[in-house]
Every structure is written in C-alpha cells, then in structure tokens.
Image: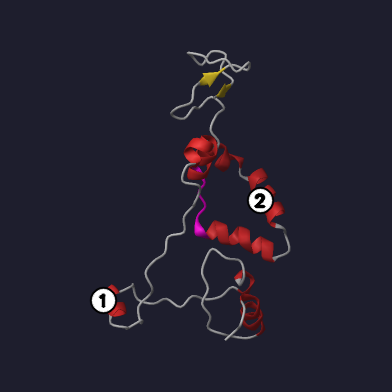
Amino acid sequence: VAKTFSDEVSMVKDGRFVFYWYEPDAAFTLLSPSSVIFPRHSAQQWAQGDRRTAPKAAYVNKACSRNLQYKAPKVKDFLSKISFDLQEAQRLLSLTQGGMSFYNVSCQWIRENRNRWADWVSGATSCSAGYGLAAMTGAFLSSRDGAFICK
C-alpha cells in the first residue's frame, strides 16, 4: 500500500497491479488500463457488507458560488452550458500526460472547437433577470436599439 498518491502512481507504472482509478483523471491514461466491471450496485447487498457489486454511481458536476448568479450572471450562464463527455475529457487529460501543458491543451481545444464553445458564450445584450440594456455611455435603454451591454 502506497503512502502517497505519487507513490501509488509510481508503483502502478512500474508493475502490473489491480488498482482503483476514477475518471476523468490523467494519472494512468497512458497505461491504457482495463476496467474490471462489477454487476450493477445492490444497496441491499452493500447494507449487509457484501461488496461484490459495483459502488453507487457518482455524478461529477460543476460547482460554483451559491450567489454567482447575482455576482456574475454571465459567468454562471457560461458554466452551466459547458459540456464534455467522459471520453473527450480523458483524451484531453491524456495530452497533458504526453507532455503538453494544461494551458496548451486548452488553447488547442478552443482553436479547434469554436463551433462547440461559441454557443456557451452569451451575447453582450443577453440580460439576466434584474439587469437591463445599456448604451455605451451606461445609460439604460428601453429597447435593443443602440444597446451595448447589460447593466
């Protein structure tokens, strides 16, 4: 048993082991590990101490400030629209294990996938509740004509 996660990574990379791993994570991606598939989770069996079925499924989600909607509504809107499937996330993470920085992987993805992320970005005059259209001068407007930003 390894004392630290770094020790565990080194041990697994140096030999053939059965090890626990979760996705998305890049630590063992380059090893192309095989999955051990257990039968679907049985709460009844787990309650009796029988762990021969898979653990309960976990949901990986996005988390943010409780009041982000009020502090930065466009950021909250953007974060709520971001979507990657597991295979795509794993592929991107594996690039970091191959030597690319997270920054370079991100920049490459952004350059190559404008059609995906463009829909995640709200227009400058797409206002959330409690905000109104404003001209470049900051004056509020009653229509989109001359609107520059939400304020």
Main SS of the magenta part reads: loop
Q: Earlier in the sequence, mark 2 or mark 1?
A: 1
Give the residue at x 42% y 76%.
37
Left or right of residue 62, residue 51 in this image: left
Q: Position of residue 8 (x, y in %)?
A: 61, 80
Of residues 45 and 13, which is closer to you in this image? 45
Q: Position of residue 25 (x, y in %)?
A: 57, 65
Question: What crowding class fits label 1: few (fewer than 14 Cα within 10 Å), some (14-19), or many (20 or more)?
Answer: few
Up the image or down, 115 lies above or below 3; here it is above
Total labels: the figure holds 2
Q: Amino acid at mark 2?
A: Ser
Q: Position of residue 57 (x, y in %)?
A: 39, 66
Up the image or down, 1 lies above or below 145; here it is below
Judged from the image, the secondary structure of the residue bearing numbered disc 1 is: helix
Q: Quadrant of the C terminus?
A: top right
Up the image or down, 30 lies above or below 142; here it is below
Judged from the image, the secondary structure of the residue bearing numbered disc 2 is: helix
Q: Which residues are magenta?
A: 81-86
Per the image, the residue denoted by label 1 is 44
The stretch drawn in magenta includes residue 83: yes
Up the image or down, 29 lies above or below 85; here it is below
The image quadrant of residue 53 is: bottom left
Q: Amino acid at mark 1?
A: Gln
Left or right of residue 45, residue 68 in this image: right
- Alpha-carbon span between mark 2 and mark 1: 43 Å
CB within 8 Å, label 2 to label 1: no
Question: What crowding class fits label 2: few (fewer than 14 Cα within 10 Å), some (14-19), or many (20 or more)?
Answer: some
The stretch drawn in magenta includes residue 131: no
Per the image, the residue denoted by label 2 is 106
Viewer-side label of 2, 1: 1
Q: Quadrant of the N terminus?
A: bottom right
